[in-house]
Image (spheres, grey):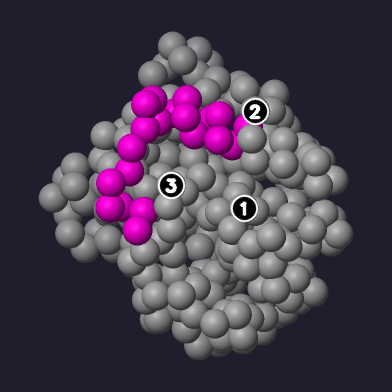
Amino acid sequence: MADRTVQPKVTTFAGLSLDRPRIMGIVNVTPDSFSDGGEALRVKDAVSRGRAMLAAGADILDIGGESTRPRATPVSVDEECARVSPVIETLAGDGALISIDSRRSAVMRTAVAAGAKIVNDVTALDGDPDAAAVVAETGVSVILMHMQGAPQTMQDNPTYDVPSQDIRDYLSGRIAACEAADISRDRIAVDAGIGFGKTLDHNLELLAHMDVLHALACAVVLGVSRKSFIGRLTGVEDPRERVAGSVAAALATRDLGVQIFRVHDVAQTRQALDVWEAIRQTHPS
C-alpha cells in the first residue's frame, strides 16, 4: 500500500495532536467482553490495567462497563455506571485522558462528571435520544462508530452495496446530525466499526479503503484488536493469541491515514507503530 500513503488534514482531536499515531487502550470493566471479560471487573484491577497501559504508551483510556460483542446481554444503566465511575474518577485523577465507551446518555453524563473527556458510542449518538444533547452540553469530544443493527442481531445477515462507501455516507449523515445539535466537527472522530454488523469480506474491504473516511474531515479511529475476523483468516481461536494479526491490521491502515488505534495490547502496538513511523520519516513515499 506504499503508493497510497495518506496524510490526513485533521491534526488534532480531544486536545491531542495527531502528528503521530495515537493509541487508545481498552479497559473493559465487564464480566463478558469477548477477549478480556472478567479480567478487570474489580475497580482495583481496572485501575491497574489502565495505569499499565499508560506506562506502555497509551494516549487515551477507553473505559467500558457493558459488552457490545455479538449477542451480548445488556446491563442496567445503574450497573454500568457503578462499574465505570470509580475507575474513571481514579484514572482521570491521575491525569489520564479518558473516553467512556457507552451508548447510553445517563452513563455518558455520569462518566463526564467523573472526568471523561470523550464519548465513544457504537451507535454514533443514534441509540439514545438524549445522547447528542449530553455531548453538546458537556463540551466533550465524541467518536461516532458505525454498527449495522444491534449487538444481539448485528451478525445475522449484514448487507452492503460497497461497505466503505455505505459507511462513509452513514457517518456523514451522523456528523450532520451532530452539527445540527451544536456539536462542532472538530470535536468529532469517526470509526467504521470493524466487526459490528460486517462479514469477513466486509471487514477486509473496509480495511483496504479506510482512506475514504478522510473525506469526512474528522479524525479516524480504528478498532480491530483481537477481533474474530483475524481468527477466521488465521485459524487462531483464542482472541488473546491474535496480537500479531491485530498489529498487522494497524500498520496496514496507518498507511491509509488512520490516526487513533483502539487496542488491548498497547506495548506491542506502540512498538510497531514507532518503528513504522521511523521508517516513514527516513524514506517517505
* Residue under the image location 47 percent in, 29 percent down: 166
**Mark pair 2, 3: CA separation:** 19 Å
The boundaries of the magenta stretch are 153-172
Along the polypeptide, which appears first: circle 2 or circle 3?
3
Mark 2 and mark 3 residues within 8 Å of each other at the beta carbon: no
Q: Mark 3 points at which residue?
A: 148
Report the side of 145 relative to 96 (left or right).
left
The local crowd at label 3, few if under 14, some if 14 to 19, many if 20 or more residues have their Cα within 10 Å, is many
Depth check: 68 or 27 in front?
A: 68
Depth check: 181 or 69 in front?
A: 181
Nearer the observer: mark 1 or 2; the answer is 1
Q: Mark 2 points at which residue?
A: 216
Residue 262 placement (x, y as % from top left): 51, 52
- Of the 4 image quadrants, the one containing the N terminus is top left
Q: Is residue 86 magenta?
A: no
Q: Is residue 159 positioned above or below 227 on the image?
A: above
Along the polypeptide, which appears first: circle 1 or circle 2?
1
Mark 1 and mark 3 residues within 8 Å of each other at the beta carbon: no
The secondary element bearing badge 2 is classed as helix
The secondary element bearing badge 3 is classed as loop
**Mark pair 1, 2: CA separation:** 18 Å
Residue type at mark 1 is Asp
Q: Name the residue under label 1.
A: 126
Quadrant of res 257: top right
| Total count of labels | 3
Residue 73 placement (x, y as % from top left): 39, 75
Nearer the observer: mark 2 or 3; the answer is 3
Residue 56 placement (x, y as % from top left): 53, 60
